[in-house]
Image (spheres, rainbow, N blue to C red):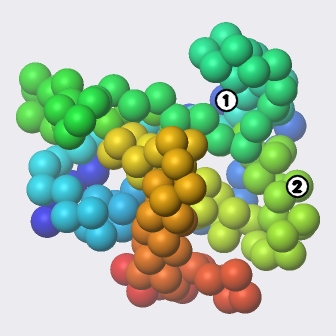
Amino acid sequence: MSKIKVMIRNNQKRIKLPVGLRLLVRKCCQAVLVTEKFENDAEVSVSFVDNNEIRRLNKFYRNKDKSTDVLSFPLGENGVYDINNETGACLLGDVVISIETAIKQAQMYNHSLEREVGFLTVHSMLHLLGYDHETSPLDAAKMREKEELVLDYLGITRDKEYSEKV
């Protein structure tokens, strides 16, 4: 089984991250690699930011002047990744999550913050592996199916809290 190093940064001061959220993010990243049968060791960076910062990043990198829930910055293309020369791990890229938007969406969808952050992490990890829901309705359906498969693997459902399946 491949190993993943997940570097997590809390780059916002508005909201205290709940206990266990970092572990959840790490488990979501690992679960994506397991379900996708990714065979190499990997590294990924995950940052929590506020709405102002994610809006700034969205405007700068995507020319969209609005906040969003999550941004993915893949470092690979077509299954080819840069390699960390010290560890031999594939550098997958960066994930940026707005914790403010995650809280708002969890309330809006009537599920836990853990489920929302889990979903956003899985969604972004799939982007880092090359999936894109914006290319076609079929690609969107495939990506949604993979998201739910990983969340189910972790025991994260819409009506249950996160469980220690993994």
Q: How crowded is mark 2: few (under 14 residues within 10 Å), some or many (20 or more)?
A: some
Q: Quadrant of residue 21?
A: bottom right
Q: Which residue occupies 65% across, 58% down?
A: 117
Element type where label 1 sits in the image: loop
The residue at the point 9 percent across, 34 percent down is: 88
Q: Mark 1 points at which residue?
A: 11
The reply, left or right, for residue 133 in relation to residue 111 is left
Of residues 27 and 148, the one nearer the viewer is: 148
In the rendering, at what x and y percent does residue 64 appear?
75, 21
Q: What residue type is labelled 1?
A: Asn
Q: Position of residue 119 (x, y in %)?
A: 60, 62
- In this view, 51 is above or below 160: above
Kindly state the secondary structure of the residue where label 2 is placed: helix
Would you say residue 19 is visible in this rendering?
Answer: no
Count of numbered badges drawn on the protein: 2
Extreme residue toward the top, this view: 60
Indicate which disc, 2 or 1, sits on the residue closer to the N terminus: 1
The residue singled out by tag 2 in the image is: 104
In percent of width and height, residue 161 lies at: 66, 83
Q: What residue type is labelled 2?
A: Lys
- Which residue is nearer to you in this view: 42 or 12? 42
User: Left of 36 or right of it: where is 138?
Assistant: right
Local packing at callout 1 (Cα closer than 10 Å; few below 14, some 14-19, many 20+) is: few
